Amino acid sequence: MIHILKIIAIIIAVTYSLKLINSQSDLLVFSGLAVVGFALYLFIIELNNIFTLIKSKL
């Protein structure tokens, strides 16, 4: 259950940061890109945890 909540939080963060990327200010664009990059990093870690959990149950 906690994995699903983390993935939903990542999706919400990416959705909000896409609004920042679409802004006129360079600082907001770069901060939006940083949020997207960090969210993708967390998503990959979470997927790795899920796959590890599935492998351990098999």
Image (cartoon, rainbow, N blue to C red):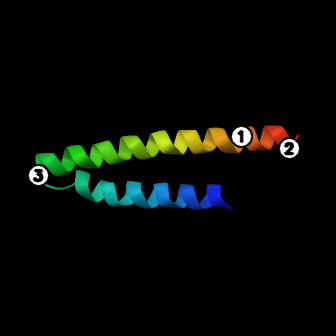
Q: Mark 2 points at which residue?
A: 57
Q: Residue 29 vs residue 38: left or right?
A: left
Marks 3/2: CA distance?
48 Å
Residue 51 tag number? 1
Residue under label 3 = 25
Q: How far apart are marks 1 and 2 (CA)?
A: 10 Å
Q: Residue at x 69, y 45 (%)?
A: 50
Amino acid type shown at disc 3: Ser
Q: Quadrant of the N terminus?
A: bottom right
Q: In which quarter of the image is residue 19?
A: bottom left
Secondary-structure class at tag 3 = loop
Q: Quadrant of residue 13?
A: bottom left
For marks 3 and 2, the one nearer the N-term is: 3
Q: In this view, does 19 lie above or below 34?
A: below
x and y percentages locating residue 29 in the rendered image: 20, 48
SS at mark 1 in the image: helix
Q: As shown in the figure, which amino acid type bears the numbered disc 1? A: Phe
